[in-house]
Amino acid sequence: MFRSTEQSFVVTLKNLNYAKLSTPHGDEVGVDNGYENNVNLILNAISEDPKITQKNIAIKTGLSTRTVSREIRELRDTGVIRRIGSDRLGYWEIVK
């Protein structure tokens, strides 16, 4: 959408990279829906591929690498997940 006023131009573009996913409870998942949804996205990615990297989790979930790193650190600190083996050759294990 394009609009012009005496002082400015306004252009509105549709974000084609934004996708809504449905969860079992029917909640909408988008870019910023809080800790629980982020954790669920990360845990689902890990359960599908335990050898997945944080970078690939970010790509798969649409979360930023910083968010994935922060959430994984929190999950590790609370004992929900742990890393078995080295960072390069290891895999994730969901404990709880």
Image: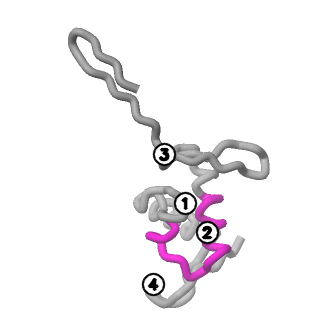
Query: Looking at the figure, which quarter contains the C terminus?
Result: bottom right
Q: What residue is rendered at 56% in x and 84% in y? A: 91
Q: Residues within 10 Å of mark 2 (few under 14, many from 20)?
A: many
The CA distance from mark 3 to mark 2 is 23 Å
Q: CA distance from mark 4 to mark 1?
A: 20 Å
The amino acid type, in three-letter code, at marker 2 is Ala
Q: Is residue 1 above or below residue 68?
A: above
Question: Of the residues shown, which amino acid type is indicated by label 3?
Answer: Leu
Residue on which the image places disc 1: 61
Q: Position of residue 68 (x, y in %)?
A: 48, 62
In terms of secondary structure, where does tag 1 sit?
A: helix
In the current view of this chain or complex, which residue is farthest to the top? 6
**Snapshot quadrant of residue 27:** top right
Magenta portion: prevailing SS class? helix
Q: Which residue is mark 3?
A: 16
| The N terminus, quarter of image | top left
Inspect the image, locate mark 4, and give the three-letter code of the amino acid beneath it. Asp
Distance from disc 2 to disc 1, alpha carbons, whole Å, reads: 8 Å
- For residue 45, which numbered disc appears in the image? 2
Say what secondary structure mark 4 lies in: loop
Q: Quadrant of residue 47?
A: bottom right
Q: Position of residue 46 (x, y in %)?
A: 61, 72
The magenta-colored residue range is 39-57
Kindly report the distance in space between the C-alpha atoms of the residues bearing marks 4 and 2: 17 Å
Mark 1 or mark 3: which is in front?
Answer: 3
Q: Amino acid at mark 1?
A: Thr
Is the residue under label 3 in contact with that under label 1 (CB below 8 Å)? no
| N-term mark: 3 or 4 | 3
Q: Earlier in the sequence, mark 1 or mark 3?
A: 3
Q: Position of residue 23 (x, y in %)?
A: 72, 51
| Residue denoted by label 4 | 87
Pair 3/2: label in front:
3
